[in-house]
């Protein structure tokens, strides 16, 4: 078994990496709760059909990134590449389509067969917000504002810009689609093979291409603004007004179409210049057709997903490593008392560790190595008198403390 490595595109999260990761998820969970979102956890794998149809068969994800396999029972299974389709499936499966709105927060691993690079992995993690039920533009703004609040709480909002666009309603899209087909057909000799395949089936998707040649063609493509119906334009204006009301700065970017098929009206991304080509940290939009695709009634919805790895990289200060209290019996005779003290500290919610190997010097060294903030030095004599020595390992100050007061003293820091 020598030389086993994690599978390409997967990572072990240990130490600071895990602290950053957990901090992003814990913060998002806390802020989502203040916006009154409930956490759901849906399965990490689903019937392939949950993703294949809903994401669109010309999307990058479905065309080349899905981890799909036939299980032992002969069913086609896919490791989830994103959360929204599974949440909508769950809404329908659990009979919640009549209990709207549902405000859902999720966090967990996603799987895409991509070319791994900085900020792009095959197993990555997302936090995710879905507001299912409301058709009002205020809902789009609330979802965006919750994302902004999370970025702010993480201290990364100043590095991120909200870019927003509309994909319009069905009528706007049909008109825009025709314009795009015309334009891209004129430039078809410059398009990548993937984009040629999209030309008939989903020309909007070409706008989202990462191919350099495609990008040059896309730069001259018509924008949707002139093809919007009055209703769609009004909806978009209203979203922008409410986003402003929530205090979220934004700029319009008519090139944002999002990579997945199920979006309509609002599309948005929070982007940063600090992560190179992997600059999108949070992305989403309105997807009024998806619940119906999952077999439910027509149900409006809006949401976003954010990459935990990319947010982790943006955190300025990694969360501090834990600073436990070290309980140090001076010799074997003091160990029984020390265990009692250890348990009392842990019972009081204090992170505590006992050093019990070697002589006193070795034990003190261990306390320093684990980054202990304080040491409780226990001898049998003193314990019999109901006291121990409390040493501040930063200042070196040491003094006697009554065992009954120890936890209280340490809790106050
Ligand atoms: P990209 O354009 O970077 O490929 P995407 O449009 O495929 O992103 P979404 O499906 O919208 O991404 O996912 C939402 C967010 O999840 C992205 O903005 C990004 O932060 C993160 N993300 C997506 N794919 C990966 C990946 N392979 N590794 C790490 N993070 C990812
Ligand atoms: Mg992608």
Image (tube, rainbow, N blue to C red):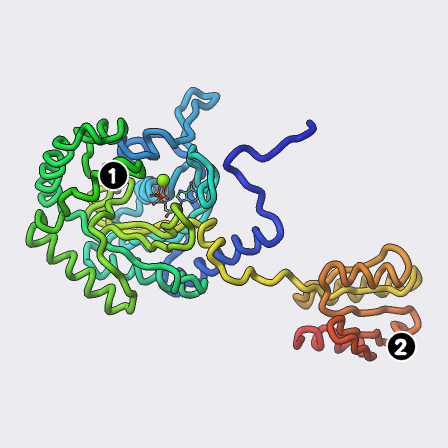
Q: Quadrant of residue 44?
A: top left
Residue found 19% across the figure and 54% down from its top = 135
- Give the class, few, some or many, for how many residues have Cα within 10 Å of label 1's Cα (few <14, many ≥20): many
Residue 218, position in %: x, y?
21, 41
- In the picture of the structure, the residue carrying the numbered disc 2 is 385
Depth check, front residue: 130 or 81: 81
Q: Quadrant of residue 201?
A: top left
Residue found 26% across the figure and 34% down from its top = 56
Quick check: 410 above or below 123? below
Quick check: 45 above or below 304? above
Residue 67, position in %: x, y?
42, 30
- Give the class, few, some or many, for how many residues have Cα within 10 Å of label 2's Cα (few <14, many ≥20): few
Quick check: 61 above or below 41? above
Q: Nearer the viewer, mark 1 or mark 2?
A: 1
- In the picture of the structure, the residue carrying the numbered disc 1 is 261
Residue 308, position in %: x, y?
45, 50
Q: Is residue 9 left or right of residue 98?
A: right
Q: Quadrant of the C terminus?
A: bottom right
Ligand 1 under 8 Å from disc 1 Cβ: no
């Amino acid at each position: 078994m020598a030389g086993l490595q994690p599978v390409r595109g997967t990572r072990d999260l240990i130490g600071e990496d895990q602290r950053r990761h957990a901090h992003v998820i814990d913060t998002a969970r806390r802020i989502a709760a203040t916006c009154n979102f409930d956490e759901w956890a849906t399965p990490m794998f689903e019937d392939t059909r949950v993703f294949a149809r809903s994401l669109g068969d010309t999307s990058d994800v479905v065309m080349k990134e899905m981890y799909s396999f036939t299980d032992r029972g002969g069913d086609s299974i896919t490791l989830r590449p994103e959360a929204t389709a599974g949440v909508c499936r769950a809404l329908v499966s659990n009979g919640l389509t009549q209990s709207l709105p549902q405000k859902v927060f999720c966090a967990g691993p996603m799987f895409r067969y991509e070319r791994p690079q900085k900020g792009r992995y095959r197993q990555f993690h997302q936090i995710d917000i879905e507001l299912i039920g409301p058709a009002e533009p205020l809902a789009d703004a609330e979802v965006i504002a919750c994302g902004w609040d999370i970025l702010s709480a993480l201290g990364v909002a100043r590095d991120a810009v909200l870019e927003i666009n509309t994909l319009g309603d069905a009528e706007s899209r049909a008109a825009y689609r025709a314009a795009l087909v015309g334009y891209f057909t004129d430039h078809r000799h410059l398009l990548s093979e993937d984009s040629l395949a999209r030309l008939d089936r989903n020309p909007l998707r070409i706008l989202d291409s990462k191919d350099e040649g495609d990008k040059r063609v896309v730069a001259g493509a018509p924008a949707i603004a002139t093809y919007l119906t009055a209703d769609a334009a009004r909806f978009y204006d209203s979203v922008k007004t409410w986003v402003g009301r929530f205090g979220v700065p934004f700029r319009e970017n008519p090139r944002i179409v999002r990579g997945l098929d199920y979006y309509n009206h609002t599309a948005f991304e929070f982007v940063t210049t600090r992560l190179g080509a992997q600059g999108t940290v949070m992305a989403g939009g309105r997807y009024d057709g998806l619940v119906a695709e999952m077999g439910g009634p027509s149900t409006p919805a809006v949401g976003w997903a954010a990459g935990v790895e990319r947010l982790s990289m943006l955190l300025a200060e990694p969360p501090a490593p834990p600073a436990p209290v070290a309980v140090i019996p001076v010799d074997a005779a003091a160990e029984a008392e020390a265990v009692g003290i250890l348990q009392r500290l842990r019972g009081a919610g204090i992170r505590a560790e006992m050093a019990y190997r070697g002589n006193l010097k070795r034990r003190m060294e261990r306390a320093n190595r684990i980054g202990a903030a304080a040491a409780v030095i226990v001898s049998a004599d003193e314990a019999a008198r109901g006291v121990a020595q409390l040493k501040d390992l930063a200042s070196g100050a040491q003094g006697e403390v009554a065992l009954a007061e120890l936890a209280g003293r340490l809790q106050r820091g």
